[in-house]
Amino acid sequence: MYFEHRNYFPLMGLLLALGGLFAVVVRRWPEPKAPLLACLAVCALLLSGLTSSQVQVWSNRSLLILNHLNGHPQSARANIDMATELARLGEIDAAHRYSRLAFEASANKAGSAERNGDYQVRNLALSCIAGKAVSPLLIETLGADDPQRPLSSVTTLLSLVRLLQDDKCPQFDRLRFADRMAQLYLVADFERKASAKIYSNLAVLENALQRYDNAFAYAQQLLVMKPYDKRGLLMKLHFATALGKAEAAQDVIATLQQLDEQGKLTTGEQQTLALYMQN
């Protein structure tokens, strides 16, 4: 398994079974109780000793990432983690090399291959993390290889959007990137372009830029694909209110009220809806 600690929880069943067997044995034959306890204690100490060897690795992020990469050199995730760590250290060229290795590794996995656009977006995020300037050409050519489906990785796009939303990359041209995304996604045949979550992420980006027209359009596209998506509905309500689209806002409120009557809204969603209904 990729992470060894995922074995620990299933191991609890074996330990409970061993404990139950021990209880049964000592009830029927009390004499071996002390030797068995000693044996179990020795086993516990040995297992603890083996586990302790990982403490130094797991207590240091860089060592942990390097350990995973050494153990799984063909893992796209391990290479992405290494690329991200190198970007944090300002080693952008090395970060881009591992990003390329991750892209190549994903190509060998059926059903999970990255698109070239995902690779490009990740490199933009790495440059952002490293505090390096990005060439306008890299942004303007983003997704050009496959304009019908530029991106497939929601996580990769979300990572960059969060960085831009939090203004972690002052040297990054957020408007140019948002404009390029709009060129790719705010089109008539959008249903062939991406998953609903891609549109959600792009709406978040436009909201951060206070470009509510584009954000509203993304929310609408999301809701065409998922008409009763609660997050999408609340986003559309926010953007419609910001744009003064009273009729659109009322339509969304009515849909959310129906969902609330069906018990499908969380307490937080109910409170958010109530705020907009008061305005």
Image (cartoon, rainbow, N blue to C red):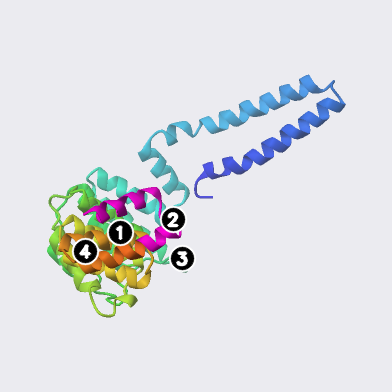
> Which numbered disc, 1 or 3, marks the residue that appears first in the sequence?
3
Q: CA distance from mark 4 to mark 2?
A: 43 Å
Q: CA distance from mark 1 to mark 3?
A: 36 Å
Q: Are marks 4 and 1 in contact (CB under 8 Å)?
A: no
Residue identifier under label 3 = 109
Magenta-highlighted stretch: main secondary structure? Answer: helix
Q: Quadrant of residue 139?
A: bottom left
Which-is-in-front pick, marks 4 and 2?
4
Q: Is residue 77 visible?
A: yes
Please name the residue shown 33% across and 49% down the image.
271
Of residues 202 and 135, the one nearer the viewer is 202
**Percent coordinates x, y for residue 17 in the rendering:** 72, 38
Of residues 111 and 45, the one nearer the viewer is 111
- Secondary structure type for disc 4: helix
**Percent coordinates x, y for residue 19 in the rendering:** 72, 32
Residue identifier under label 2 = 75
Q: Are marks 1 and 3 in contact (CB under 8 Å)?
A: no
Picture disc at residue 240? 4
- Is disc 1 surrounded by few (<14), some (14 to 19) or many (20+) residues within 10 Å? many
